[in-house]
Amino acid sequence: MRFIFYTHSLISDWNHGNAHFLRGVMRDLIRRGHEALALEPEGAWSRDNLLRDQGEGAIDRFHATFPDLQSEVYGPEFDHGAALSDADVVIVHEWTDPNLVEQIGRIRRDGANFTLLFHDTHHRAVSAQDDIAGLELADYDGVLAFGETLRERYLKAGWGRNVFTWHEAADMTLFKPMPEVERTGDLIWIGNWGDDERTAEIAEFLVRPVKELALNATVRGVRYPDTALAALEDAGIRYGGWIANADAPRAFAEHRVTMHIPRRPYVENLPGIPTIRVFEALACGIPLISAPWDDAEQLFRPGTDYLVARDGDEMKDRLKQVLADPQMAGDLAISGLETVRSRHTCRHRVDELLAVLGECGTQRVVQKLATAEAAE
């Protein structure tokens, strides 16, 4: 089948975690014999910032790292009807311009045979409800929400006929243990500043414990204001700026522990939804300690796959324990890796996507799925 994904950007992962997941899903579809194409807009905020920050070399690096992935940039004169004429499945991300969301729906309504899905991986459904409520989704066959609480929000608000939970996951072709890499640091945190959505949490769970323990620590990410950079420097934390997602596995391998610091809107309003870095870090076999969040869907096994710290003092204690006890660190790494491999890879998510298509897909898609299944 031919899959087309409307995304903010496939090429750029600068403050754009959904690119991580989409790349993994597209690569798995391609490995199964499907076609996959991403369409991204001119002037995409993430890609423009990547170019300003890193230059054209970062774009070249993407193509060299992912030669199997195709992305086409569209502008105001782009013919979306022609582009979708041979599509079997079209998946539109929530960061897509609302007018285009509606236009693609009209194309579907006017007789197109593709299955049309809307994909939401953000907290705007609770933090900016009018943005989502204003979208025209009546002509969409289904909605993919990246957590059960978000799915329930869509259903309660009547924003979709068929709404499915579709969590993010790790691309295990990239994210895997690298035991051959020498561990030269204690702690690494890979995360963006987050528009003040976790300012206090970063100070409590990262900066203060690292400073008090005098750890060899590194932070990678973007959009850190001067005040944050000064706090990191005062704590002796190295700041490395943006890191290509494909380089994250090696960065994890070079350190002994990492952490999860969720954004406040997810903790308060969308429990059960971790950042994609949790899936990716555990897939790399690194011990993880998390600030408080409610694993409402039991994606993982708290205390077994990762440790939880209720406050900064407990984070300090947890860090000391993991760094001083190789057996504990090894057990956490093995357990977390086991859970991701068994439940949370992009291969699992593609299986789930195909199941969704079997439930709400057009007749053409359902027939193609049945043919493929019979051939296996």
Image (cartoon, grey):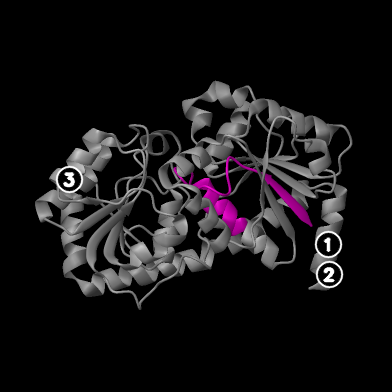
Q: Amino acid at mark 2?
A: Ala
Question: 347 or 302, which is in the foreground?
Answer: 347
Q: Residues within 10 Å of mark 1 (few under 14, many from 20)?
A: few
- The stretch of residues the image draws in magenta is 1-25
* Label 2 close to label 3 by CB (< 8 Å): no
Residue 137: tell me if it is visible: no
**Rendered residue at 33%/32% (across/down):** 196
Inspect the image, locate mark 1, and give the three-letter code of the amino acid beneath it. Ala
Q: Position of residue 53 (x, y in %)?
A: 41, 43
Q: Residue at x 77, y 37 (%)?
A: 80
- Residue that numbered label 1 is attached to: 370
Looking at the rendered structure, the secondary structure element under dot 2 is helix
Indicate left or right for 8 with 83 as reference.
left
Q: Which mark is residue 282?
A: none
Mark 1–mark 2 CB contact (< 8 Å): yes
Q: Which residue is mark 2?
A: 374
Q: Which residue is mark 3?
A: 233
User: How far is the residue under mark 2 from the one under mark 3?
Assistant: 60 Å
Q: Is residue 49 left or right of residue 104?
A: left
Question: Going by the image, does 148 lie left or right of 351?
Answer: left
